[in-house]
Amino acid sequence: MFLGHVNARNPNGLTALGEFALKAMMKRGMIIDIDHMSDRAANRALALANFSPGGYPLMSGHTGIRERNSADLNAENARTRAQLAQVACLGGMFGVGTDGMGAYKWAGAYAEVYDVMRRALLPVAGARTPRLWVSASLALGTDMNSLVRTPPPSLFDLFGTPHFADIYNPNNPINAGLPPLTKSTTGNRTWDYNVDGVAHYGMYVDFLRDVRTWGGNTTLTGHQIVDDQVMYAAENFYRMWLKAEAQKTRIP
């Protein structure tokens, strides 16, 4: 049982009106994100979405796996592994949040989420390649709003792996086969990812170039995360929406 920050005011998670509202959204084919629900509300929403085989896809757009000993992911807005598995099996999507994470730490978090979702989908996948299934479920989540931090400069990644990201050098083999990447300029200011981090949304390109250089673990490499996964996220969001549209007439 999770004993961290949890809203326990409603034992069922959702009121009768709340359940009515969720079903009304499903009947209209709307995309429903459960990230700002209480833990019990998220569980109830997932239960409502499992109304039949296949169910209705839900998404969790910008968070991580809940960890009791984590300073950032010990609250109910982070997903439990059981919730994450349900999101995968429903055909929903999960956005791995970048709040204050350097490229390599984020890549490790992505690989961990990938592994949980892959294991959940293995019985469903049969003979198909698990990676093809999971790529339909994972994306990058930001929620940059002045309260949520952007990824830090790679050289000053205090909570990850400080390193020099040679992402602007076309002669470095790590950039082979990729379009040249130039530093972002705003007025008289030129932004260098190594010392400025992700200073604005446009610099997520720089961030992903850095993610691509992550050596990886037994699950994924940085190259696979970016080229085989993140680059297909927009297409897979569209496919999730198609499933929502297909399922909306089946809501009880």
Image: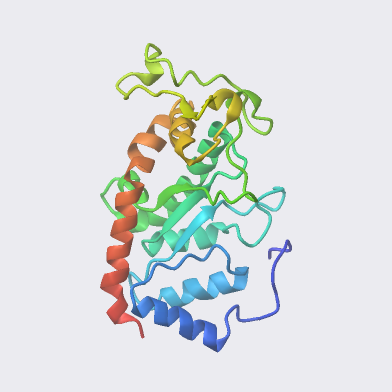
Q: Position of residue 159 (x, y in %)?
A: 67, 34
Q: Tell whether 37 sits left or right of 222.
A: right
Q: Position of residue 54 (x, y in %)?
A: 33, 69
Residue at the image position 48 percent from the left and 75 percent from the top: 47
Q: In the current view of this chain or complex, which residue is farthest to the top?
A: 171
Q: Tell whether 30 sits left or right of 3.
A: left
Residue 40 occupies which quadrant of the picture? bottom right
Residue at the image position 69 percent from the left and 48 percent from the top: 70
Q: In the current view of this chain or complex, which residue is farthest to the front?
A: 187
Q: Is residue 141 above or below residue 180?
A: below
Q: Is residue 52 above or below residue 147?
A: below
Q: Is residue 88 visible?
A: yes
Residue at the image position 36 percent from the left and 42 percent from the top: 229
Disc tally is 0
Residue 58 occupies which quadrant of the picture? bottom left
Q: Is residue 233 above or below residue 225?
A: below
Q: Position of residue 149 (x, y in %)?
A: 62, 44
| Quadrant containing the C terminus in the rendered view | bottom left
Q: Is residue 221 visible?
A: no
Residue 170 occupies which quadrant of the picture? top left
Q: Nearer the viewer, residue 191 or 217?
A: 191
Q: Nearer the viewer, residue 134 or 204?
A: 204
Q: Nearer the viewer, residue 131 or 242?
A: 242
Residue at the image position 43 percent from the left and 34 percent from the top: 205
Q: Is residue 187 above or below residue 81?
A: above
Q: Nearer the viewer, residue 189 or 23?
A: 189
The colour scheme applied to this rendered structure is rainbow
Q: In the current view of this chain or complex, which residue is farthest to the bottom?
A: 16
Q: Position of residue 1 (x, y in %)?
A: 68, 65
